[in-house]
Amino acid sequence: MTNEDTNTWRFLPATISDGCTNMAIDEAILVTRIKGLVPNTVRVYQWSPSTVTIGRHQSVALEVDTAEINRRKFQLVRRISGGGAVLHAESKEITYSVVAKIPDLTGSFRGTKNGVEAIYQVILDAIQKTLSKISLSPVAGVIHCPALLLDGKKFSGNAQCIKNGYVLQHGTILLSVDPDEMYSVLKPPQGVTKGRMVRSVMAKVVGLEECIGHKIDPHDFGTAFKETFSTLLGITFRDGKLVPAEASLLDGLKAKYVSEEWRLKYP
C-alpha cells in the first residue's frame, strides 16, 4: 500500500487514551498525511479520564469551570479544530476521526453539497448508514455545528481542521448522557442558569444506548463504520497502527496540549 493509493485507506481500531494523547494522535496523523507519509486514515477512540475539549479559538473562562474540572480530575484540552466546548465522558461516548486529502474524500461521492459541507455530508452519511444496521434512523441537522439527531435529539457533534487541502474531522457519538455532570464543567451561556441548561440537554440530547436499550461496543461500531465507509466511497481499508513518523511526533504534541500556553491561548 502506497500512501498516495487513494483507494486503500488505513483504519485504526478503537483505543482508550487521555485527552492530550487523543488530540496529539489526531494531529500527528494530519501532519504526516500532509507530508505523504501515511495514507488517508479513519480512527475510533474513547477517553479516560473524562475530558473537556474546547474549540481552537474559544475562551477558557467563558466556556468551562476549570475548578470543577480539576475537582473531578478531568482533563481540559484545546482542540486544533473549531466548534464548541464538549465533555467527552469516560465510557459514555465513541469518538471518530477522519484524516484525508479532501478530493479523496469527496471526489467520488455524489452528494448535494460542495466544499466544507461536502466533507461533512459524506462522513455523516457514513455514520447514518452505519447506525441503520442497528435499526436506528438518524438524520443530519445543524445544532451549533453539523450534527446527527434521533427523533429531533442530538447525539453527534462534529468539528474540522482544514490545512493544505487536507481535512481532520472528528466527532462524538454519544452513548449515554449525564446533563448535570455536563453542565457542572461546562458553563451555560450568559444569563442562562445551570438548571435551565440541564433541562435543555434532557430535552434536546440523547445517548444511543438509551435508544436501543443495550451497550454498543466501540470495536463493533468501528468495524461497521469501516465497512459502510468502504462501500460509500468505493475504497478498501487495511487495519493498521501509528507508523514511526507519527509516533515520533507524539511527545512534542502531548507537551503542547498539556501546556498552559496552548490551553490558555484565549483565557
Image (cartoon, rainbow, N blue to C red):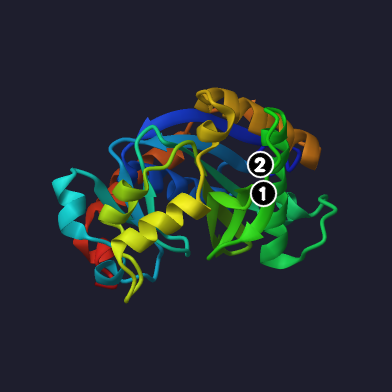
Residue 178: image location, x then y, percent = 37, 43
Residue type marked 1: Leu
Does the rendering let one see residue 35? no
Q: Is residue 37 above or below residue 92?
A: below
Residue farthest along the right direction in this orientation: 110
Residue 78 horizontal side relative to residue 44, left or right: left
Residue 117: image location, x then y, percent = 69, 63
Q: Secondary structure at mark 2?
A: helix
- Of residues 65 and 237, the one nearer the viewer is 65
Q: Secondary structure at mark 1?
A: helix
**What residue sits right under mark 1 in the picture?**
124
Look at 34% across and 42% down and name the residue there: 21
Real-space Cα separation, disc 2 to disc 1, in angstroms? 5 Å
Residue farthest along the bottom direction in this orientation: 191
**What residue sits right under mark 2 in the picture?**
127
Q: Quadrant of the C terminus?
A: bottom left
Residue 214: image location, x then y, percent = 52, 23
Look at 68% across and 54% down and name the residue there: 140
- Of residues 264 and 153, the one nearer the viewer is 153
Q: Is residue 165 above or below residue 22?
A: below
Does the rendering let one see residue 182? yes
Residue 10 horizontal side relative to residue 203, left or right: right
Residue type marked 2: Ile
- Of residues 161 and 171, the one nearer the viewer is 171
Q: Residues within 10 Å of mark 1 (few under 14, many from 20)?
A: many
Residue 121: image location, x then y, percent = 71, 55
